[in-house]
Image (cartoon, rainbow, N blue to C red):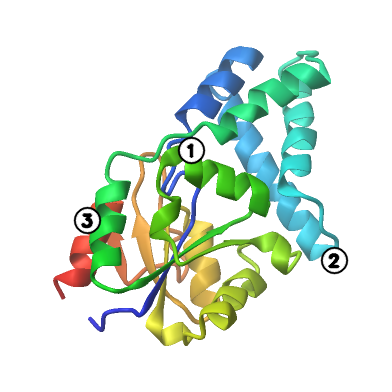
Amino acid sequence: MKKPELLIFDINETLLNLGPLTDAINESLDSEHAFSLWFRTLLHYSLTETLTGNYEDFSVIGKATLKMTMQKFDKNLSDDALDSILGNIKKLPAHDDVEEGLKILKGDGIKLVALSNSNAKLLNEQLQFAGIASYFDAIVSVEEVASYKPEAAPYKAVLAKMSVSPENTMMVAAHGWDILGAKRAGLRTAFVAREGHAIYPLNGTPEIEDKTILEVAQTILNN
């Protein structure tokens, strides 16, 4: 396997543990399924915005879809309560394997970029809170292209910013849809098999599949 020059990392779930946000949503809506439903709805409507030629901030869509989810569970929370719940996204720890994996990749001279559907301000706050912002050569939000992953524009924007070809770039993500989007944009891919996540079986097979960021790093550097 040819070692990539550039690694692009998805953030939420791939690098950051969504546990605090998951717990807050599930407890507030009194269901262990509430977070999963909200997150799927958030992704659904962010893609709807992109497919219909519009762009709304991911946090705005997040609150709107949480209101929709709230209604499904017959709850009536105030705007302030919803803001408080969603504020947990700024307080997510990195998964235990993440910092060591980023450290050895950075030490080997591979360029590292964070790419998220979140806006730039939130993305930077998240990475600073998790203590991993310093490992990245660039931190990129899809707001730069006003288009959500897995549409091709966000991936291509990173390639242009970093002046690296797609064949020398690898997308690292814990979401099958993100892996598929990156593949369709011509990038190489590495899937992080976080609990509850799976590869899309229709042409979504990645070049690398490991359980942690550290294992992905070791696979890249040992080949």
Residue picked out by circle 3? 215
Residue picked out by circle 1? 129
Provide the secondary structure element on which disc 1 rests.
helix
Q: Where is residue 107 shown, x and y percent of the image?
A: 24, 66
Q: Where is residue 102 shown, x and y percent of the image?
A: 31, 57
Depth check, front residue: 183 or 96: 96
Provide the secondary structure element on which disc 3 rests.
helix
Res 142 label: none
In space, the residues marked 1 and 2 are separated at their CA atoms by 33 Å
Alpha-carbon neighbours of circle 1 within 10 Å: few (<14), some, or many (≥20)? some
Q: Where is residue 112 shown, x and y percent of the image?
A: 41, 67
In space, the residues marked 1 and 3 are separated at their CA atoms by 23 Å
Alpha-carbon neighbours of circle 3 within 10 Å: few (<14), some, or many (≥20)? some
What kind of residue is marked 2? Gly
What kind of residue is marked 3? Glu
Residue picked out by circle 2? 53
